[in-house]
Image: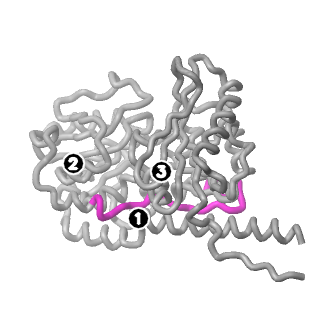
């Protein structure tokens, strides 16, 4: 019998990554951008978004981003139903892959709802980066559970965006790995050296208590209203787009300042002008499994942090004494008051020590290694079967 040898890394640079995402690349800079941006430094990455419906012909609009990453946005005619969408998308996707010269690739999913477009493809490996419990979100399609079960059946690897999600999913697949939200500490440490406030924040008095992120059904806007009413002398700065909730329902008080969405590059300059960072998340199904990226980002920016008791914030950040946990408006105000009096030098020392064990670079490297092992294992199995 011939001796078979296999390279230590089958996830070679010439292999591409095709990502299927419900999140748009240019919306909010978060987990997909951190990870796929790093993969694009070594691999060609094609980031496929959900369709936009217009009056033109079915087509993909492809835009080049940094390094080897391209964003592909499908455009379909108005009124295209689900069945026709799947048929058109399979055709468009096949053509796109040919035009991009992609032969060997890893399929990377953020949503199972795109399976109908691409379940005929034969990738080297299938990765499901399950960053949220999508079925718990507002307006989630009823078939999402069924589609996710199909994706679990196809996936070689499942990554979860936090510990709670890992505990919920690990019994559904033999290869589930926990990769919580991580940090580009150097980027957010710029907040420690901010000289001048951004123009739309400079005239807001102190103390400032700030939040950055999407403002949606996960936000406890009633909690925000109550704490702003209780402390009229504090200023609450809210950065981020408002989605899936009515802007008219947001509390409108003189000490609440909605400054809109900001770029990832600009966030340290805003956070550096805050006295305390907050995470006023609602406690509901949509937040049950979240692992907020802003937790380590706030800490890397040197801010004291107050949060509602989100499981993946309590563990490990609350238990480590890095984040103050508050359940009621009264507790939230008390915790902010305590944070305003905190020894920032000691807080930053503890935060830096904790964050020193994590980074998006380390997450990328660990994920890449698992993909390499999966491809090598599959290649070995196929080759052995042919002997």
Instruction: Name the spot of residue 122 as percent of width and height, x first.
Output: 73, 51
The span from disc 1 to disc 2 (Cα, nearest Å) is 27 Å
Q: At 10% from the left edge and 50% from the top edge, which residue is drawn?
A: 196
Task: State the colouring used for the structure image.
Answer: one colour
Q: Which residue is drawn at 65% across and 27% down?
A: 85
Closer to viewer: mark 1 or mark 3: 3
> Which of labels 2 and 3 is toward the front?
3
Please state the horizontal and vertical placement of residue 309, each as a whole percent of the image. 42, 51
Image location of residue 49, percent across then percent down: 53, 38
Query: Which callout, 1 or 3, points at the residue further toward the start of the chain?
Result: 3
Q: Mark 2 points at which residue?
A: 270
Q: Which of 37 and 5 is in front in this view?
A: 5
Q: What element carries label 2?
A: helix
The reply, left or right, for residue 309 in relation to residue 117 is left
Quadrant containing the C terminus is bottom right
> Is 306 located above or below residue 258 in the figure?
below
N-terminal of the pair, mark 1 or mark 2, is 2
Q: Does the magenta stretch include residue 184?
A: yes
Q: Quadrant of residue 231?
A: top left
Relative to 151, say whether 61 is above or below.
above
Q: Tag on residue 69? A: 3
Write down the region rendered in magenta. 167-188
User: Taking 303 as reference, is 11 left or right?
Assistant: right
Residue annotated with mark 1: 319
Question: Pointer 3: residues within 10 angstroms few (<14), some, or many (20+)?
Answer: many
The residue carrying pointer 1 sits among few (fewer than 14), some (14 to 19) or many (20 or more) residues within 10 Å by Cα, namely few
Say above or below: 245 vs 268. above
Q: Is 185 one of the magenta-colored residues?
A: yes
């Amino acid at each position: 019998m011939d001796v078979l040898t296999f390279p230590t890394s089958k996830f070679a640079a010439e292999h591409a990554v095709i990502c299927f995402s419900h999140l748009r690349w240019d919306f909010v800079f978060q987990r997909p951008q951190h990870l796929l941006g790093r993969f694009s430094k070594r691999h060609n990455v094609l980031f496929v978004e959900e369709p936009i419906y217009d009056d033109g012909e079915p087509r993909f609009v492809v835009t080049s981003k940094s390094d080897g990453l391209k964003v592909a946005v499908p455009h379909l005619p108005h009124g295209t139903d689900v069945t026709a969408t799947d048929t058109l998308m399979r055709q468009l996707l096949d053509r796109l892959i040919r035009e991009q010269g992609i032969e060997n690739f890893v399929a990377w999913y953020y949503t199972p709802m795109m399976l109908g477009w691409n379940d005929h493809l034969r990738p080297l490996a299938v990765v499901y980066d399950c960053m949220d419990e999508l079925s718990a979100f507002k307006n989630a399609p009823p078939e999402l559970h069924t589609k996710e079960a199909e994706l679990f059946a196809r996936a070689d690897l499942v990554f979860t965006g936090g510990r709670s999600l890992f505990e919920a999913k690990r019994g559904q697949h033999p290869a589930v790995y926990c990769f919580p939200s991580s940090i580009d500490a150097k980027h957010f440490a710029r907040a420690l050296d901010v000289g001048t406030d951004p123009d739309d924040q400079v005239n807001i008095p102190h103390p400032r208590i700030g939040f950055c992120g999407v403002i949606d059904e996960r936000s406890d806007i009633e909690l925000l209203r109550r704490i702003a009413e209780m402390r009229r002398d504090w200023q609450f700065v809210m950065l981020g787009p408002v989605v899936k909730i009515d802007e008219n329902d947001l509390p409108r008080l003189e000490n609440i300042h909605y400054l809109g969405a900001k770029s990832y590059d600009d966030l340290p300059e805003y956070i550096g002008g805050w006295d305390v960072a907050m995470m006023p998340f609602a406690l509901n199904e949509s937040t049950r499994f979240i692992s907020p990226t802003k937790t380590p980002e706030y800490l890397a920016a040197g801010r004291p942090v107050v949060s509602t008791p989100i499981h993946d914030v309590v563990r490990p950040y609350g238990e480590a004494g890095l984040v103050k946990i508050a359940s009621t408006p009264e507790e939230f105000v008390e915790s902010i008051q305590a944070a305003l009096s905190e020894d920032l030098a000691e807080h930053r020392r503890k935060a830096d020590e904790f964050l020193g064990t994590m980074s998006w670079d380390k997450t990328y490297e660990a994920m890449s290694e698992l993909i390499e092992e999966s491809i090598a294992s599959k290649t070995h199995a196929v080759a052995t079967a042919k002997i």
